[in-house]
Image: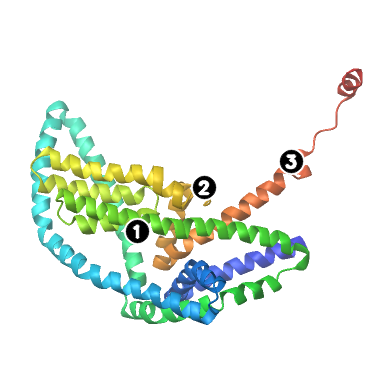
Amino acid sequence: MTARQQAASWLIGFVVFIALLIVLGDILLPFVAGMAIAYFLDPACDKLESIGCSRIVATSLITFVFFAILVAVFMLLIPLVSAQIINFIERVPVYFAALREKSILIMGLVESRLADEQMRQLEGIFASASKQVLAYAAGVANHLIGGIGSFFSLLSLAVITPVVTFYLLRDWDRIVAKVDNMLPRDRVEMIREQAALIDETLAGFARGQALVCILLGIFYAVGLSLVGLDFGLVVGFLTGLISFIPYFGMLFGFAAGMGIAIAQFGELVPVLLVAAVFGTGQVVEGNFLTPKLVGDRVGLHAVWIIFALLAGGSLFGFLGVMIAVPLMAVIGVLIRFLLNHYMNSPMYLARTKPSSDETLNEEIK
């Protein structure tokens, strides 16, 4: 097979992959979730095998413990979170009224320093920007919720995902060996090397970032609750969960927390304490959690991660969010591989033929 035929085959495969995502998006969700969980748990299963457990025993134990912990966490958190969400919905009008009163005071101060024309321009800019941001956020949120909001999707996630996880985890090593046997023998070492880099990238992001999000969620939830912020548990936990989107998670939590704090407290000190919780969280994440748990293994710039997650969520809903980073990791590794080959190829290293004067100078030297 020529290089052109290989490129055409990869292009056709990519088009078929995108078509399957579009047509079978809702059906694929529990299978992709099960595959992600199996990938996440495979090292623990290998560890149990290394100390003498059979693969089936290790798989059964790991799968049961993981989903038992997941169910227990949901059973504990759902009553607390649902109660806070209901209370928040009931208090939204009160918060808006308080924020409106305080914003009127601030706008009065601003208006006293600006001319009428400048004030109208400022109001128009804010109104236009807020409408665009809210419309985009609502569209992405509706797409995400629509991907997991139906009864069938929730039922399939609850029932099919554990089954898929069990069977994939049990046969993970055999699947990897089978795929390895299908690789072209003349390129097998090169493909294995790139696959190892992809695995390192995914492991660095998926396993490391998951721990970072959980620890941040606990920190923000406890910190905001101790400060006395209304719905601090919900705001803090959600901030931690969406912290896998660089910067966006913290900005979302900070905006929500500060908005509630300004509406709730009539003094400056509690508002500053809420800001201090988010500031401390950022310092802890940037200097301790992310360097220790994720490090430099990801190899993906924050901008690309944000783009991949937003594009995946906008195009394919929750399924797109799940596959966005793995797909971007694969593309990133392949691009670095191609760039490395280009930098070592004659196309990059070739020099123009030296002139007779340059040749004479070299001979004199």
Say which of 80 and 24 sits in front. Answer: 80
Which is nearer the N-term, disc 2 or disc 1?
Answer: 1
SS for tag 1?
helix
Amino acid of disc 2: Asp
Is there CB contact under 8 Å for labels 3 and 1? Answer: no
Percent x, y of residue 228: 14, 51
- The residue to which callout 1 is attached is 214
Position of 34 with respect to 192 (left or right) is left
Pointer 2 local density, CA inside 10 Å: few below 14, some 14–19, many at least 20: few
Q: Quadrant of the N terminus?
A: bottom right
Judge depth for marks 3 and 1 and give the one in front. 1
Residue 281 or 318: which is nearer the viewer? 281
**Element type at marker 2?**
loop
**Which dot marks residue 348?**
3
Q: Tell me if residue 27 can be seen.
A: no
Residue 213 visible? yes
CA distance separating discs 2 and 1: 20 Å
Label annotation for residue 20: none
Q: Amino acid at mark 3?
A: Tyr
Left or right: 345 with respect to 55? right
> Residue 55 falls in which quadrant of the image?
bottom right
Q: Mark 2 near mark 3, Cβ–Cβ under 8 Å?
A: no
Tag 3: Cα neighbours inside 10 Å, few (<14), some, or many (≥20)?
A: few
**In the rendering, at what x and y percent does residue 217 appear?**
30, 56
Q: Quadrant of residue 319?
A: bottom left
Is tag 2's residue or tag 3's residue first in the polypeptide sequence?
Answer: 2
Residue at (46% x, 60% y) in the render = 207
Q: Residue at x 74, y 68 (%)?
A: 184
**Depth check, front residue: 18 or 260:** 260
The quarter of the image holding the C terminus is top right
Residue identifier under label 2: 296
Q: Secondary structure at mark 3?
A: helix
